[in-house]
Amino acid sequence: MVFFSNALTVAAASQPVTKNLTAVRKVTQISLIIRSMGTATYVAVGGRGSQDRRLTTVGDSISIDAPLGSRYIDVSTLFVSSDTSDAVLEIIGDTYTGVF
């Protein structure tokens, strides 16, 4: 596993959570934490078509682990959006290296 971290300014249009981490695709776990809300009232997290999970205050977070029986999650299918374009999301996790 290789640790990664990054910050992403969340746009009003949905964007991949790994927009700034193009080399990261398969992860064993990932955490999304609100670093700053700016003027946003929420940051939405979910799939390409619908981001139905809402983070609403600084410090709110979502952690996702690979499901039982699977070694990794393909985070290219994880998207975020907001109602404005100034919330900042901190992204941390471990990439899957295929070793274990």
Image (cartoon, rainbow, N blue to C red):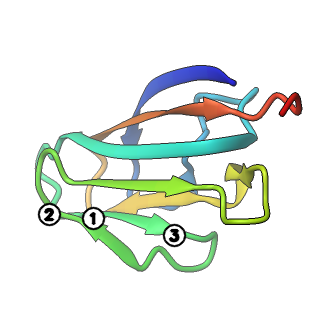
Examine the rendering and report whether any part of residue 87 can be seen. Answer: no
Q: Nearer the viewer, residue 38 or 89?
A: 89
The residue identified by callout 3 is: 46
Residue 99, quarter of the rendered image:
top right
Element at badge 2?
loop
| Residue 76 drawn at (x, y percent) | 72, 51
| Residue 50 drawn at (x, y percent) | 53, 79
Examine the rendering and report whether any part of residue 79 can be seen. Answer: yes
The disc placed on residue 41 is 2
The residue identified by callout 1 is: 83
Inter-mark Cα distance, 3 to 2: 17 Å
Residue at 47% in and 73% down? 51
**Left or right of residue 50, residue 42 in this image:** left
Element at badge 1?
loop
- The quarter in which the N terminus is drawn is top right
Residue at 16% in and 62% down? 56
